[in-house]
Amino acid sequence: MPEFDLASAPLRDLNQALHAIEPGTNDLAFDIRNPRGSHAVAVGCDAPLTVNVHGSVGYYCGGMNAQAAITVRGSAGPGVAENMMSGTVIVEGDASQYAGATGRGGLLVIKGNASSRCGISMKGIDIVVAGNVGHMSAFMAQSGNLVVLGDAGEALGDSIYEAKLFVRGKVKSLGADCEEKEMRPEHVALLENLLERAGMTDARPSEFRRYGSARKLYNFSIDNVDAY
Amino acid sequence: MCGIVGLFLKDPALEPNLGALLSEMLVSMTDRGPDSAGIALYTQPVQGRAKLTLQSATPDRDFATLEDQFGEVAGGDLHVTVKDTHAVLSVASDRVEAVREAALGLDTVRVLAAGETIEIYKEVGLPREVVERFDIKRMAGTHGIGHTRMATESAVTTLGAHPFSTGADQCLVHNGSLSNHNNLRRVLKQAGMRFETENDSEVAAAYLTRSMAGGRDLGEALTAALDDLDGFFTFVVGTRNGFGVLRDPIACKPAVMAETSQYVAFGSEYRALVGLPDIDNARVWEPEPASVYFWDRSATAGKAMAA
């Protein structure tokens, strides 16, 4: 099992090793020690790797991830799992701004809180946050699902397209064109699956409310001018 | 971008290490700004004494004559310690204002700070160069803040470097940019505040000084700043007794804090905090937008209040 100690090994060596995985390689588990807030840890993975990061990371950890299962045993700085394509990123602590931004696929699990702009412009990623999310989360969210077991900050889902938002706690305020929606059986099933995949065993779908687009901002309409 | 750091010690046993800890924190933020760097340190007060930090681009000429020039106005009791381009003057507390006024009259000397415990060191260059130049690592103190600058709103000069001090024992570092600083500077000038630069962050410092001179404490002044300052900011503010943190409501500028039984620390990034004692067991969190945090040495515990 390859191990990288970032107290001595350059970050570039780590990321180049992660990118150099040949098809058919069996040795796919990486341990990373002493990240000490480093930026861009394990970005651009494109193989079914298991990456364990023992400590807290800085900006953009797990960015552009495809296929890999990355676990941060600490907290993550801004932009964790930004533009993820597939695979999973699990943060055992908190995540800073714009976690999962623009993500196209895969699953991002944050076991602590996420701060502002979580899931901004998400395009297919699933994000499950055990704690709270900050203001402007799911801003312009296009598709995918954001599940929040705690509370959501101001302007949740502002200018949202077709992403689905599930919040168990309080929502401080909804953004423009975001509204509460009915939880139909297919949403309960979807949420149940997301909670199970994220390992959130103490939450039941019936405890959540669903939010999504009121679809009034898709096209300009003079009747909606107050909402623009 | 800019990188900012702050360290407030609760445990006196760490006080001899303040300069070293703060230097390491600031150097770790070098990537966030290469233009200039500075540190403000608050030392243990000495009964009846106050001090001034002066800066000159021609220190050999300007500082050699300070004792003669200011001896009389200081009442014959003046100690000058020269460190590179800076000089720290120790005077009796009741003479510090007179000495400050006299120093403001010198063409090639700038007063960077005045007060009972504050000293400020700042210059153009990287954090490592600046902390070595002024031997910051050997300095003891109770709390301090630091800044490494990526210039946006004014020129890369020593005076454009942070921290900015606009009142006795007060200083401020800023990551961000203010959009209403010109108008606010006009208002503050009319109210009698004096400015050294065209820098937006100096306006924020002067705003807080003016606000506290009107009877507000630091927490109240920071709360009022949310209404009166427009733009992006994460501020760390030092006063004689403590330090405060404020982020604007949008909170694009990063901030991480850590607290243990020994200290409260602030960094633009977690990287700034990793060298602190027992950081693995610290409570680490991201300060909330539009919320005032401040810690006061005269209070038993820190305060965080939502604005």
Image (cartoon, rainbow, N blue to C red):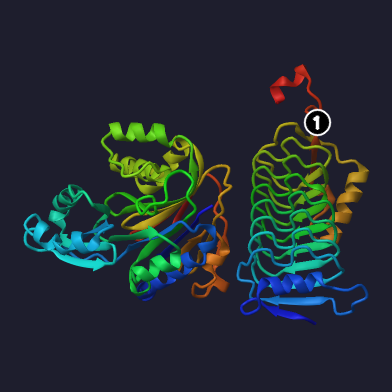
Which residue is drawn at the image coordinates 34% and 40% (left, top)?
Answer: B211
Most extreme residue toward the top is: A222
Residue B96 relative to residue B187: left or right = left
Which residue is drawn at the image coordinates 90% and 77% (left, top)?
Answer: A25
Give, as a three-letter code, the residue at label 1: Ala
* Residue B4 visible, this orientation: yes
Q: Is residue A74 above or below residue A167?
A: below
Residue B232 relative to residue A49: left or right = left
- Which of B275 and A202 lies nearest the eye of the viewer? B275
Q: Quadrant of residue B206?
A: top left
Q: Position of residue A164 (x, y in %)?
A: 82, 43
- Which of B291 and A158 lies nearest the eye of the viewer? A158
Q: Quadrant of residue A153?
A: top right
Residue B150 relative to residue A221: left or right = left
* Residue B306 visible, this orientation: no
**Quadrant showing the C terminus of chain A:** top right
Which residue is drawn at the image coordinates 31% and 40% (left, top)?
Answer: B210
Q: Quadrant of residue A175?
A: top right
Name the residue that disc number 1 marks. Answer: A214
Which residue is drawn at the image coordinates 85% and 54% (left, top)?
Answer: A105
**Quadrant showing the N terminus of chain A:** bottom right
Q: Position of residue A101 (x, y in %)?
A: 73, 50
